[in-house]
Amino acid sequence: DIQMTQSPSTLSASLGDRVTITCRASQTINSWLAWYQQKPGKAPKLLIFDVSSLESGVPSRFSGSGSGTEFTLTIRSLQPDDFATYYCLQYNSYFGFGPGTKVDIK
Amino acid sequence: QVQLQESGPGLVKPSETLSLTCTVSGGSISNYYWSWVRQPAGKGLEWIGRVYTSGSTNYNPSLKSRVTMSVDTSNNQFSLKLSSVTAADTAVYYCARNIAGRGGYYFDYWGQGTLVTVDS
């Protein structure tokens, strides 16, 4: 069973900030990692798949990187629409989500 | 544009069976994996299981003994049954499509979610 962790659990940031969220897996998951954004009362929205591939229509300020067991989601310049909770997902062995990182206004 | 819509009772009694259906529109249900994911209020996301359009299934080991999923390709629908429910099963239930990346399958399209409350 692959366990996923995320840090930080909450992140306070200002508009224009560069934001980095880290996701770690308890064992290697190859490149089978995705990132989702979720706003209150809404379904998760796919941002990144296969570690670093940007989903169609997602702004280029979002990027993903990493390998093996450690991965990051970076938002280059935080915009008002980016305040949300972010989840990583491993799909190497069935599916497992990280516990989430809430990005709120500083 | 593919759209998914969950439907089913919003209130289920303890020890009974939760039943939900997801209707897919804007595209064919065929040749994809389809999953259910749930989220208790204020908590994270948990994958419940997936069904392929052939009817083959994979379930989360933690729920496997209580989960049954099926697909109805003629109506572009797939379904979830979760038996012997307790208050711990109260959550928003999402249906989602699995799509293949370079190797694995991630979720691309999601339904809006439906709240199911377990209460007598």
Image (cartoon, rainbow, N blue to C red):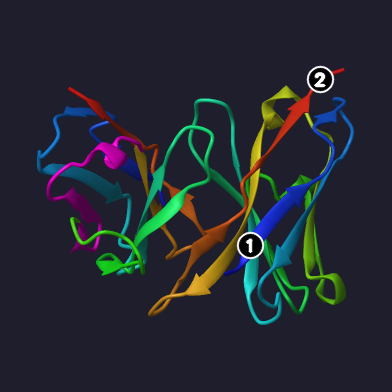
Which stretch did the figure color magenta? A62-84
Q: Residue type at mark 1?
A: Gln
* Element type at mark 1: strand
Residue B3's disc is: 1
Instruction: State the residue at coordinates (24%, 66%).
Output: A52
In the picture as drawn, the residue positioned furthest to the top comes out as B120
Can you see residue A1?
no
Residue B119's disc is: 2
Is residue B96 found left or right of A9 in the rendered image?
right
Q: Residue type at mark 2?
A: Asp
Q: Residues within 10 Å of mark 1 (few under 14, many from 20)?
A: some
Instruction: State the residue at coordinates (87%, 17%).
Output: B120
* Element type at mark 2: loop
Where, by quadrant of the figure, is residue B73 drawn? bottom right
**Tag nearer the camera, 2 or 1:** 1
Q: Chain of mark 1?
A: B
In the picture as drawn, the residue positioned furthest to the left comes out as A17
Give percent across and percent down for residue A11: 22, 29
Instruction: Compute the Cα span from label 2 to label 1.
Output: 30 Å
Instruction: State the residue at coordinates (75%, 27%).
Output: B117
Q: Quadrant of the C terminus of chain A?
A: top left
Can you see residue B99?
yes
Q: Nearer the viewer, residue B57 or A88?
A: A88
Rendered view: B29 above or below A9:
below
